[in-house]
Amino acid sequence: MGKKPFSSDIEAARYPPPPPPSFYMQQPRQWFSWLVPLIFIANIAMFVYSMYVNDCPAYLNEDVCLFYEYLGRYSFQPFNENPLLGPSVRTLRLLGALEKDLVVGENEAWRFFTCMFLHAGVIHVLANMFSLLFIGVRLENEFGFHKIGILYLLSGFGGSLLSILHLRDATVPNTISVGASGALFGLLGAMLSELLTNWTIYLNKRDLKPCFLLQCAALTSLLLIIGLNLAVGFLPHVDNSAHIGGFLAGFFLGFVILIRPQYGYVNKKYVPPGHDSKRKSKYKGYQYFFLILSVIVLLCGYAYGLTTLYIGNPDEEILSFLRKITQLSDSG
């Protein structure tokens, strides 16, 4: 009595201790980029079509149309009219350029988006399209066509909105705005916010110190590129308001659209059955904060811009309304 039953090593080896549960962390999906090249082709095609519609020799003397002997109908407007080598203002307005009187007076809101596919000249379209390929293809590979498509359109709309508010106060009447610059600056802004909101993910990919230095270098380079592009906006005939509006819209959209789960997060479907260990939340606290703040800023910004454009200065309207209430209360 009191003796433990004899168990051989063979019997003990029949029931080895269970291995610790392993988690499968889903790797980020690599997308095939097709939307950005499609936008590239659409912009080039629209520029060629705009030159076809322009038909400089039909409206001006053939001698003043640039490169008429080589291009014929597709020759450019005189240099003193369009130094960017492109069509006339009349053609761009016809095809969907952004103009305050047409958007507000004629209810042609579609011009907020069509102006993104029109360009003032060869120099303009080539500069924008090479920038689009350089920035957009990498973003689409990482985040997919659906996110980049939404980001491109909403950033472009933000650039168009601020641009038309600037055109409203322009000293030259009937000024138009064209180009994909607002959408491109939106992609730059989104790259910056994506780097900030997903910072800890990049830090955990490699050793801490080398990766930290790499991210600081990437952030510094991105800020330098953004600064140089904004500086170009101060040149004559360049609408910097579209650049700023697109950049701000893309910056805040990046916190919403390009947010990634924090490092170490495991989706519930990849957790082994019967394992009850506590999992990390999908996003970190600061990511939730920037997401909520960005949604509020975007909604307020778009609402304020549209209200200012179609109704007038909302501050003046509110003050006028408060004055009426004060007068009624005093008379009562």
Image (cartoon, rainbow, N blue to C red):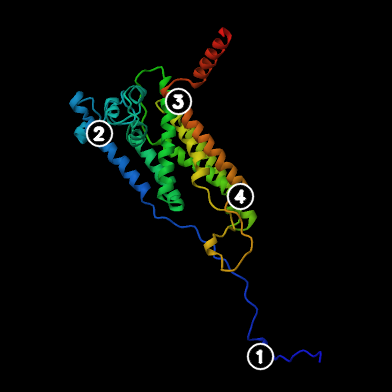
**Whole-number angstrom distance, CA of label 2 to CA of label 1:** 87 Å
Q: Quadrant of residue 206?
A: bottom right
Q: Is residue 198 left or right of residue 35?
A: right
The residue beneath circle 4 is 284
Q: Nearer the viewer, mark 2 or mark 3?
A: 3
The residue beneath circle 3 is 307
Residue 234 appearing in the image:
no
Amino acid at dot 3: Thr
**Whole-number angstrom distance, CA of label 2 to CA of label 3:** 35 Å
Quick one: 321 or 131, which is closer to the camera? 321
Comes first in the chain, label 1 or label 4 = 1
Picture coordinates of residue 116, whole percent (x, y): 36, 35
Q: Is residue 149 left or right of residue 278?
A: left
Placement of the N terminus among the 4 image quadrants: bottom right
Tell me which residue sits at (37%, 41%) in the image.
129
Q: Are marks 1 and 4 in contact (CB under 8 Å)?
A: no
The residue beneath circle 1 is 10
Residue 2 appearing in the image:
yes
